[in-house]
Image (spheres, rainbow, N blue to C red):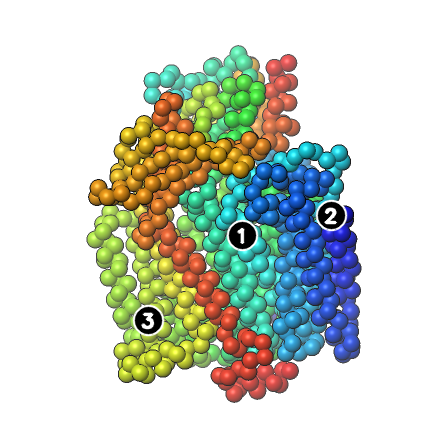
């Protein structure tokens, strides 16, 4: 009898997995869109040095006054590479300033990465130890936030931006915020 | 007209598959030879119909028929012919058709080559195969019709993703699917055995070549895929533990375990229900991979266009196939007669340990892949799992596996002793130690993991050769005797030696490129020098280049070593105007002990470019080792006992008796 139960193990384990898959498929659960407690809240206070020597530091107050896109990326992050052309498209098509936060990266790696792929960012800040990313509630790179002119976070996208998310989520939100 | 014919062929194939899922099973249950025999022409007709539909889709792609949506989305008149063909499977609908093509190919293979199989076993196997085909054909016709027309037709198409326009990637999916989907036939064999309630050495003898064929295809597909990532993504990484990569790697791990446990069933009539379970799990993992890749439950770099409707459909298919097979397993497997007994220290014992390690390794990959999803579903939290997890879990499991891999083949069946195995491995052990010391002398600062890796790789490589040397009595018998024994080795045993040695070489390659890579990034002007790994690299400037569907900027780097010219490397940055994407084409100089890898990017000022230069030590060994493993699989497949109608000359009497009794 004991051994018979053992033979039931595979199907029981699979049942659990299948249930997880089913929940995972529920509409509205887009693995890229994460409900963030920060939505419609003021962006957290921070001050970060620029990635490039000689440029002034950047803090939360610099976000106020116009709509910004804040994008966290790293040169070691594979999806960031996939996302990069979309960011370039965003910068070119909307002219919105994109603030890049370079997450847990080495300066020279980040520079090489930008040199290779191009630079869509208006400012690039270095979050070397990842502390600011924690305040922003970042789970992993890449993540993208839209911050309105009052410094409130209005949209958060986890994972790489795609042409679709650009068209359906990001650009409409920017248009709405700009009035 | 052609698209409609293709669509029609799919629908007819669906009906044939429906008939074939039922009648041969009824025939086998009632012992009606007429119904059982239907399975053979049924499988052949299905294959012919799907091949025809696939030909139709290829035709509309090659002729750039922009009335078909699939062509519009993925093609362009200026695209080179090779990529017009590979564009057929470079998208969701076409790749599903390739999936079904492989399903029916394996069905047709068993129909054609299984002439000596017991009639009921063949009928049941082909019926189960037809059920899988039925499910996937229904999926294609209901949700993913590749022949969908558009009106009005556009003047031109959107072009294929430029990253996929690459010769390596053109052949990668067919090989990968050959392996991935090939395990379906092993699954069907397992289902047939469970329905029959009997697993014996003859069954294992029928299953093994198909397992081996699928394994060989999957090995080739994974090797090519990682090679593509290495040179196309522009920075020389070969493996990222991405969900899509893991989706092909898990069936490979369990399939490798299956390959070995089936030997025990064939030779010793043991491990039966375990082997059946592995057969089910291997294909289940293939199914799960298909689900993960196409449903969008996990985010990945390589994702297809995602549609939750399709996700539900594949999940339903998976629940029926996997749930059904596990239920059948829970019901029938306990009744399988237990097989021969053996001592822990024996060939069987070593193979059991091999299976446990491979299965555990597959489980760690499974957990790493699904943990983000499960955590999200259970706790609503989001995480990503990366290489630190795999380095901490997967890699340590490989060390005992590699140690065992050399010892196992030297142990006898039933009972054996480790002492004699080790005494026959003395030279290999000494030689591997020497390699480690030599590495230490060369790179005394090297990380400890690197030394462990070098030790494992050289142990596997040298140990496999030592096992061969032992088998042909090298150094123990006269040269004539050694030559005679060498000539008497079966192709299967050559296959094993090649595959094991190839794995050793591939390990060395992985270790070299992962741990000792050298990197240099600099903004360069024409005339600038870079020194890397003994090479002197001079940047000469950029020149424009033109491709059929892209424009490019090719940089020119002259490479010299010790003052003598070696080669000229021309990495490119390509711009594809239709897809509006830029890609980097690295230029690579391959030498036996490493690659010099150059990629470029825009520089900080107009007259400079950014040069990224890497030295990837031993990386060619990774591809060479993979190729040897594939060659080993192919040679083993050509063993005479697998060939059609060839009498098994060296079959053991006991086994021959068992085989006759089974038939």
Badge number at residue B171:
1
**Image position, residue B46 (x, y; %):** 71, 62
Q: Residues within 10 Å of mark 1 (few under 14, many from 20)?
A: some
Across and down, in percent, residue B595 comes to 34, 47
- Which is nearer the N-term, disc 1 or disc 2? 2
A63 shown above or below A107: above
Q: What residue is pinned by disc 3?
A: B466
Q: Which SS class for mark 1?
A: helix
- Rendered view: B516 above or below A49: below
Q: Residues within 10 Å of mark 2 (few under 14, many from 20)?
A: many
Q: Closer to the observer: label 1 or label 3?
A: 1
| Residue beneath disc 2 | B3
Image position of A167 with respect to B439: above or below: above
Snapshot quadrant of residue B473: bottom left
| Image quarter hosting the C terminus of chain B | bottom right
Q: Mark 1 touching mark 3, by CB under 8 A?
A: no
Q: Residue B245 in the image: state x and y as whole percent.
A: 51, 49
Disc 3: CA contacts within 10 A as few (<14), some (14-19) or many (>=20): many
Of label 2 and label 3, which has the lower sequence position?
2
Q: Is residue B395 visible in the rendered structure shown here?
A: yes
Between B536 and B310, the one lying in front of the other is: B536
Q: Residue at x 73, y 43 (%)?
A: B148
């Amino acid at each position: 009898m004991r051994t018979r139960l053992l033979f039931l193990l595979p199907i029981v384990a699979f049942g659990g997995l299948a249930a997880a898959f089913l929940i995972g498929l529920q509409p509205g659960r887009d693995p890229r869109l994460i409900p963030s407690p920060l939505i419609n809240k003021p962006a957290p206070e921070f001050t970060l040095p620029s990635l490039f020597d000689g440029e002034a530091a950047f803090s939360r107050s610099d976000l106020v006054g116009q709509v910004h896109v804040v994008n966290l990326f790293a040169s070691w992050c594979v999806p960031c590479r996939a996302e990069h052309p979309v960011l370039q498209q965003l910068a070119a098509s909307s002219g919105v300033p994109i603030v890049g936060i370079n997450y847990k990266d080495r300066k020279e790696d980040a520079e090489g990465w930008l040199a290779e792929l191009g630079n869509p960012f208006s400012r690039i800040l270095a979050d070397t130890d990842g502390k600011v990313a924690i305040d922003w509630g970042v789970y992993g790179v890449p993540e993208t936030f839209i911050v309105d002119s009052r410094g409130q976070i209005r949209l958060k996208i986890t994972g790489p931006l795609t042409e679709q998310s650009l068209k359906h989520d990001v650009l409409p939100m920017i248009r709405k915020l700009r009035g | 007209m052609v698209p409609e014919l293709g669509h029609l062929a799919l629908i007819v194939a669906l009906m044939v598959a429906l008939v074939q899922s039922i009648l041969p099973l009824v025939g086998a249950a009632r012992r009606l030879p007429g119904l059982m025999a239907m399975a053979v022409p049924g499988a052949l007709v299905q294959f012919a119909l799907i091949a025809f539909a696939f030909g139709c889709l290829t035709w509309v792609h090659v002729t750039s028929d922009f009335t078909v949506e699939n062509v519009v989305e993925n093609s362009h008149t200026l695209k080179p012919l090779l990529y017009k063909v590979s564009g057929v499977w470079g998208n969701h609908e076409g790749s599903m058709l390739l999936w079904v093509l492989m399903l029916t190919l394996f069905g047709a293979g068993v129909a054609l080559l299984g002439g000596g199989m017991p009639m009921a076993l063949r009928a049941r196997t082909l019926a189960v195969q037809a059920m899988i085909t039925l499910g996937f054909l229904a999926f294609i016709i209901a949700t993913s019709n590749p022949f969908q027309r558009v009106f009005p037709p556009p003047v031109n198409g959107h072009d294929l993703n430029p990253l996929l326009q690459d010769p390596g990637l053109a052949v990668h999916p067919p090989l990968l699917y050959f392996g991935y989907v090939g395990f379906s036939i092993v699954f069907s064999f397992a289902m047939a055995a469970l329905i029959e309630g009997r697993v014996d050495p003859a069954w294992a003898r029928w299953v093994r070549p198909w397992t081996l064929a699928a394994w060989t295809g999957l090995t080739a597909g994974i090797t090519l895929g990682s090679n593509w990532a290495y040179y196309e993504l522009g920075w020389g990484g070969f493996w990222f533990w991405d969900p899509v990569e893991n989706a092909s790697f898990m069936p490979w791990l369990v399939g490798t375990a299956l390959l070995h446990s089936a030997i025990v069933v064939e030779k010793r009539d043991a491990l039966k229900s375990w082997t059946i379970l592995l057969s089910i799990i291997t294909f289940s993992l293939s199914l799960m991979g298909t689900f993960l890749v196409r449903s969008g439950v996990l985010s990945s770099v390589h994702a297809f266009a995602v549609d939750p409707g399709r996700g539900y459909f594949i999940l339903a298919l998976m629940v029926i196939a996997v749930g059904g097979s596990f239920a059948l397993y829970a019901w029938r497997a306990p009744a399988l007669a237990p097989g021969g007994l053996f001592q822990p220290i024996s060939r069987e014992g070593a193979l059991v340990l091999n299976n446990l390690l491979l299965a555990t390794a597959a489980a760690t990959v499974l957990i790493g892949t699904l943990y983000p999803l499960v955590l999200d579903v259970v706790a609503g939290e989001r995480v990503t799992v990366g290489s630190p997890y795999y380095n901490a879990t997967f890699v340590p499991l490989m060390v005992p596996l590699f140690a065992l891999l050399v010892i196992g083949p030297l142990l006898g069946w039933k009972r054996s002793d480790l002492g004699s195995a080790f005494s026959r491995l003395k030279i290999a052990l000494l030689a591997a130690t020497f390699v480690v010391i030599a590495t230490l002398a060369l790179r005394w600062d090297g990380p400890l993991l690197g030394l462990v890796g070098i030790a494992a790789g050289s142990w596997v490589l040298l140990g496999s050769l030592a096992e061969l040397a032992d088998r042909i009595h090298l150094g123990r018998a006269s040269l004539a005797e050694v030559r005679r024994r060498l000539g008497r080795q079966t192709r299967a045993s050559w296959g094993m030696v090649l595959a094991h040695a190839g794995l050793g070489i591939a390990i060395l390659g992985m270790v070299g490129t992962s741990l000792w890579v050298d990197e240099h990034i600099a903004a360069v002007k024409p005339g600038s020098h870079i020194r890397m790994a003994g090479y002197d690299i001079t940047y000469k400037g950029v020149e424009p280049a033109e491709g059929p569907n892209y424009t490019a900027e090719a940089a020119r780097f002259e490479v010299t070593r010790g003052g003598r010219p070696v080669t000229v490397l021309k990495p490119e940055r390509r711009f594809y105007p239709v897809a509006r994407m830029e890609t980097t084409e690295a230029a690579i100089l391959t030498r036996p002990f490493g690659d010099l890898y150059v990629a470029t990017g825009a520089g900080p000022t107009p007259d400079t470019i950014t040069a990224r230069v890497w030295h990837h030590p031993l990386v060619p060994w990774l591809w060479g080792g993979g190729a040897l493993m594939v060659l080993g699989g192919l040679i083993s497949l050509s063993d005479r006992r697998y060939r059609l109608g060839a009498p098994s000359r060296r079959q053991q009497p006991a086994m021959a008796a068992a085989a006759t009794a089974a038939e």
